[in-house]
Amino acid sequence: MIEIVKKIFLEDWKAKLFSLFLAFIIWLLISLGEWSVYEVKITVPVNFKDLPHNITVFSASTTNVELFLRVPKKLEQEVKKTNPELNISLSEFKTGQIIVPIRKEDISNVPKGLEISRINPSSIVLNLDKLVEKFVPVEPLIQGKEEREKIDVEPKRVRVLCPSALLPLLKTIPTEPVDIYELRKNKEISVPLLLPDPRLVLLDSKYIKIRLEKQE
């Protein structure tokens, strides 16, 4: 039995020791490769929340930020599953220009094991404006209108919440285009309004009735 053991461990021991050493090196390289870290860039949208009801974000220096993550190679599949979010609370701010720093703790939904190395940009410049209620005339957009035909709309005005900076520019709110031939056929058509600016908030119904009346 002893001779068999000696034969197994001592015969060609140099070659066996070299094979063992080579296997250890291969295992070590594989292990180090799994724990090697690389950087991944992800574009994250900015969500503004907790705005007072009469305040709006009139402009922002950016609506997306670049998030750089340090990712171990063994967790690279986690990057495909991640969906980070950047939520910025504006509950404590008033109107005017503000600079909001972006902190790592503002980023949510980052999988465990992935580390945020940096964020670009590191802050966002915002212009907050007061929302003002205003009645605005409705402008029907008629394609192919003739002079002998009169167009009537109901209601003739709608209420909107408008950033104060836009008030001098807001004269009318148009409807979706309506073909005169379709209007002649149906006499009355219900169409949606087209808000000229996404910062406007419509307080009344989105749909307007357009009627065709023949002049005597």
Image (spheres, rainbow, N blue to C red):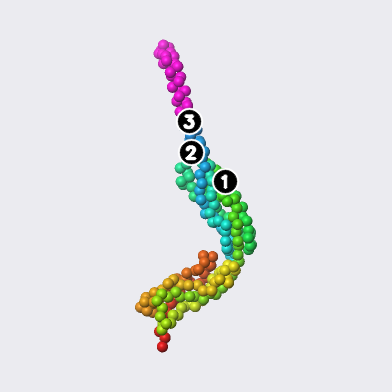
The residue that appears at 60% across and 57% down in the rendered structure is: 125
The reply to whether the magenta stretch includes residue 2 is yes
Q: What are the residue bounds of the magenta stretch?
A: 1-28
Residue 209: give x, y in percent of width and height. Answer: 44, 76
Asked if the residue at tag 1 contacts the one at tag 2, i.e. Cβ–Cβ closer than 8 Å, the answer is no
Question: What kind of element bears circle 1?
Answer: strand
Which residue is at 48% across, 47% downward?
82
151 w.r.t. 21: above or below: below
* Amino acid type shown at disc 3: Leu
Give the residue displayed 48% in from the left and 35% down from the top: 34
Q: Secondary structure at mark 3?
A: helix
What secondary structure do most residues of the magenta stretch adopt? Answer: helix
For residue 29, which numbered disc appears in the image? 3
Q: Local crowd at mark 2 within 10 Å, few (<14), some, or many (≥20)?
A: some
Badge 1 is on which residue? 118
Residue 89, position in %: x, y?
59, 56
Residue at x 47% of width, y 41% of height: 76
What amino acid type should be assigned to the residue bearing mark 1? Arg
Specify whether residue 23 is in view.
yes
Residue for badge 2:
73
Residue 151 percent coordinates (x, y): 44, 80
Residue 117 x, y percent position in the rendering: 56, 44
Q: Residues within 10 Å of mark 1 (few under 14, many from 20)?
A: some
**Marks 2/1: CA–CA distance:** 19 Å
Give the Cα distance between marks 3 and 1.
29 Å
Query: Looking at the image, is 180 positioned above or below residue 216?
Result: above
